[in-house]
Amino acid sequence: MSNDFQIPYFKLDAIDQSILDLLHENSRISYTDIGKQVGISRVAVQMRINTLMEQGIIERFTTVINPTKIGMMVSAFFNVDVEPKYLEQVAEKLANDPAVSSLYHMTGPSKLHMHGIFADNQEMEGFLTDKLYATEGVVSVDTQLLIKRYKSRMGMKL
Amino acid sequence: MSNDFQIPYFKLDAIDQSILDLLHENSRISYTDIGKQVGISRVAVQMRINTLMEQGIIERFTTVINPTKIGMMVSAFFNVDVEPKYLEQVAEKLANDPAVSSLYHMTGPSKLHMHGIFADNQEMEGFLTDKLYATEGVVSVDTQLLIKRYKSRMGMKL
Amino acid sequence: MSNDFQIPYFKLDAIDQSILDLLHENSRISYTDIGKQVGISRVAVQMRINTLMEQGIIERFTTVINPTKIGMMVSAFFNVDVEPKYLEQVAEKLANDPAVSSLYHMTGPSKLHMHGIFADNQEMEGFLTDKLYATEGVVSVDTQLLIKRYKSRMGMKL
Amino acid sequence: MSNDFQIPYFKLDAIDQSILDLLHENSRISYTDIGKQVGISRVAVQMRINTLMEQGIIERFTTVINPTKIGMMVSAFFNVDVEPKYLEQVAEKLANDPAVSSLYHMTGPSKLHMHGIFADNQEMEGFLTDKLYATEGVVSVDTQLLIKRYKSRMGMKL
Amino acid sequence: MSNDFQIPYFKLDAIDQSILDLLHENSRISYTDIGKQVGISRVAVQMRINTLMEQGIIERFTTVINPTKIGMMVSAFFNVDVEPKYLEQVAEKLANDPAVSSLYHMTGPSKLHMHGIFADNQEMEGFLTDKLYATEGVVSVDTQLLIKRYKSRMGMKL
Amino acid sequence: MSNDFQIPYFKLDAIDQSILDLLHENSRISYTDIGKQVGISRVAVQMRINTLMEQGIIERFTTVINPTKIGMMVSAFFNVDVEPKYLEQVAEKLANDPAVSSLYHMTGPSKLHMHGIFADNQEMEGFLTDKLYATEGVVSVDTQLLIKRYKSRMGMKL
Amino acid sequence: MSNDFQIPYFKLDAIDQSILDLLHENSRISYTDIGKQVGISRVAVQMRINTLMEQGIIERFTTVINPTKIGMMVSAFFNVDVEPKYLEQVAEKLANDPAVSSLYHMTGPSKLHMHGIFADNQEMEGFLTDKLYATEGVVSVDTQLLIKRYKSRMGMKL
Amino acid sequence: MSNDFQIPYFKLDAIDQSILDLLHENSRISYTDIGKQVGISRVAVQMRINTLMEQGIIERFTTVINPTKIGMMVSAFFNVDVEPKYLEQVAEKLANDPAVSSLYHMTGPSKLHMHGIFADNQEMEGFLTDKLYATEGVVSVDTQLLIKRYKSRMGMKL
């Protein structure tokens, strides 16, 4: 007879949820301060955070840096058309390039969707001409530059 | 006579750069551990980090959460075509929506580029039908779902 | 602490799977013949089929009719662009039209994807002009006609 | 002198039409029940159905299965761009793939239009990367996932 | 029981076909010359041509004029996007415009496909600005100019 | 010093224009009838028509045949994308194909624009698969079928 | 009878051509230096240049300024989709805007093609949001930024 | 510690700005006339202009020629799709072609954007067929012809 079956994931309780909210707001907050705000002990906080890390729910504690403040003036999206049989090979090469900050395979046309940050147009043009266009299997590239950022919620991995 | 003029931004020295690298890798690292690795005192580390925060180079310390581990299974990109005169109004409304994680105005067609994360297709369909499609000025929406993530460097704000 | 959570669906055992395969191949097969082939009693077959229907796994027993043999010569796909706020209203109207055989909301551009079968070009042209183009909220229609069918597995609802 | 000429197809009388409607609604209906409802004998029903099958009007009796109830959560459309000279070869290979439920050559751009059903994104991603993208002659693939099904009239082969 | 049914059209015999070929090649050919070439009498030729005209097979005898030789230098195709509910109204208005030589509704996007011939760019620009763009319901126009004519078989109405 | 220069073409007087109008309306009209209507002698008519033919203004006298009346049910437009270096070679091959009625190189994307008339979908499908798709240099084909003809002024070569 | 007719323009002799070449290379060259190089008197040079200006062949003597050297860092192309009936009105408004350097109506989709130069992204974003998007009749805007200039021959008005 | 850093360019004072405006309006204006209008000596004008030329702010003094007045009737834009790895090679070849007046690499799809001026359609067709289409690496070309020029500010290099 047919039975129930399931895709497993973790359902957070209210305290886990509060801890994640606090860490998302400020990842340098101390266990003690978290404990005070959620009403459990410092040790219980540490245990729960360790569990959240072991479960892969927390991937990393990181720092949001504003690229324009350090002279990285050009934020770009690239839709990269690839000859289908080269998709994995091209994706692997691009993922290893330090200029590439994100790389996705999306529905829609069989393109790689890529994000990059550059000091200026000239640096981006060098990346395009010397690296991207020279990659075996790349058929065409659609480049879009950031005009304005309305919102960018960091820390939640798309 | 014509003179030099400049767009100001900050040029980091090697120690600042190392501090940012360490904080980007793990934002919960202690001042003491940073100091040991870059060869300056704990107090000097704290002063430099404070300066980096005041200059707006460091925007926030945050935590990267894996959405699929907490049951947010659908990551989506939306290209939102807006009647041009409504662009700012639509952008403001969408930026305030908790389902929207990022929102950009890019070169290319006058579209808003938006990211969102949803529990499942049904939740996304509700967002589309009840919120996005119902927004005054929205002309059409192109929805793309994440198939595979090759790389996602968190912490560097695109 | 975080717990497991699940999207429920039914996992078929080997006998259920065989019964579905036989019914999919020929829905007029008798319980007795099914029983012989899967090695259970006629009554057990009937019980399992009833359960599969109650669970919604079997939706319907139906008959595949070749439209060209009864003079329905034109099979068409329509991508219907709709003003977003009218999407549900247009979808409801079209779903009630007997000329429409399938109607979907897909990712990609915010279009309705629709299938229809017509006696000839003139009947289709009447449907386009009198019904589809006259529907409030329809912005444009992309019509594609079937040239050749390589495969069409009936019975599995897309 | 010029004469009349014709494309032959079958014109159904009212009784044939009623029998097809009943079988389309429920293909497991007995000859006796059909006979009662259309007002002819059980034997006459059987003869007419045999004729409809011999004429190819009835192609098959089948069963509609809801894929999401058995854990096939992802319904997808693929528009497959093929190097023109490979079209037949690619179509033949894809038509033999069990993951492909329908495959058509439509007017519009010279693409194959294909339907498939998958357990989840990962299974679909494997199909794309390992099979579709690796097929000689495939130039690009546009993938669209089902968000909502408004109508799906099974049994009438498009 | 189901019967044969038919779309009626005329099947030409070999003599009709030869007459049409001769008239298509040179519509000013005399009945006598046709008769000699196809081996029937002058009167029989006239009777057959009259029948072909009554059946609507021959629509008209006409003359092919080379527009560039009389100073009509610009041959243009226009794909006219129309708000769907205005399609018939726009088509009727454009069909009555002497600048429009052909006007079709094709599959593909719901556009009117239109041909026109103009003395020069300025005359075409006046047609676009004063007439086409000013027509209620016209959403956009894609204009293409003839660069080179490889073949144009006149007399067979597409 | 700079001088006037000119692209030569022929400017018709009122009588030539009337003769062309009459021949365009009915190319089998006699010289005598033309003479009566434009007020010159039968011989003068013949001389003027001969001149118009020598100048290439009149290209041919032809006959408009309605393809649907002789069982040519499918009128199609094809936009044929060609690898640029093969354009002339492909155009020459297609222009010699009897199924091709018109063939143009237009502004816009570097495609050949082609018209064809076929008995039915199957004949067109054979043309696509066996001829067009098999032609060296053809990259993709966009096929559009005629749904409705609003106007088709024959005799003026586009 | 039909006669020759002509679009008048000026055919330059070799001396006019040489004068134009020299002025195009350096518009501040003296009449004396031109005269020496083309072998006519200073007065004859002046007379020919005056004639070229009266004929409208020479439109203006101007100076090529490199915008990036004076802090105009962003060169942009805009394809502006306009509701057809507003085209002339929008074109007139944009042509009067000092930020717009060129504005054309081209074949292809009924868009205005526009060039502009801006100090930075923020200035361009202000132009888009405050002026272009706010213009009655503007339906959408496709913005493209200059990455690299391979060639820009000034002085020949496109 | 982090320091200020800068992209250098020249900021013009009011007198430089006025000189550039006068030269842009009429590049043959004498130093004396400029001096009178901006209120400095003839020598100071000459010195400032020399400096502006050395700084690269003034690139050239040139002459605007109206191409239609000398029989160059066809102004065209070409969007040239290039196989990415050939981009630089194709750009270099095209930049050396005298028929090409401007050539840019823009954001958006990886196309070269090119301007050209031709005597007539036939000359342009020759350029397309013999040169552009025959260039190794050119994948497709989208040709657009100028219909109307609303504004063309010469002298400011885009």
Image (cartoon, coloured by chain):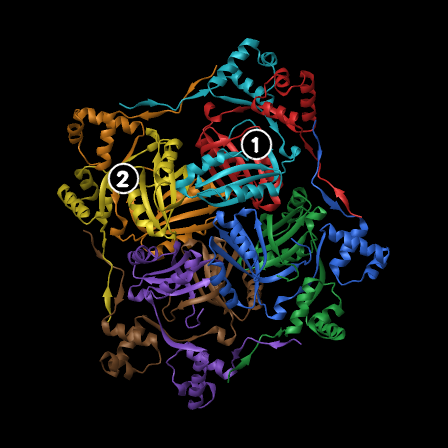
Chain colours: A orange, B yellow, C cyan, D red, E blue, F green, G purple, H brown
- The image shows residue F51, relative to residue B98, as above or below, that is below
Residue type, label 2? Glu
Q: Residue at x 14, y 41 (%)?
A: B42
Q: Residue at x 50, y 85 (%)?
A: F1
Q: Which mark is residue D97?
A: 1
Say yes or no: labels 2 and 1 on the same chain: no
Residue type, label 1? Asp
Q: Which residue is mark 2?
A: B25
Q: How many numbered markers are drawn?
A: 2
- Residue nearer the viewer, H12 or B14: H12
> Is G84 left, or right, of E118 in this rendering?
left
Where is residue H45? Give x, y as percent. 26, 79
- Residue nearer the viewer, B139 or E27: E27
- Residue nearer the viewer, G75 or C28: C28
> Is E28 left, or right, of F109 in this rendering?
right
Residue A101 image-quadrant placement:
top left
Query: How busy is the neighbourhood of tag 2: few (under 14 within 10 Å), some, or many (20 plus)?
Result: some
Q: Which mark is residue E56?
A: none
Q: Quadrant of the N terminus of chain E?
A: top right
> Is E92 left, or right, of E10 in this rendering?
left
SS under mark 1 = loop
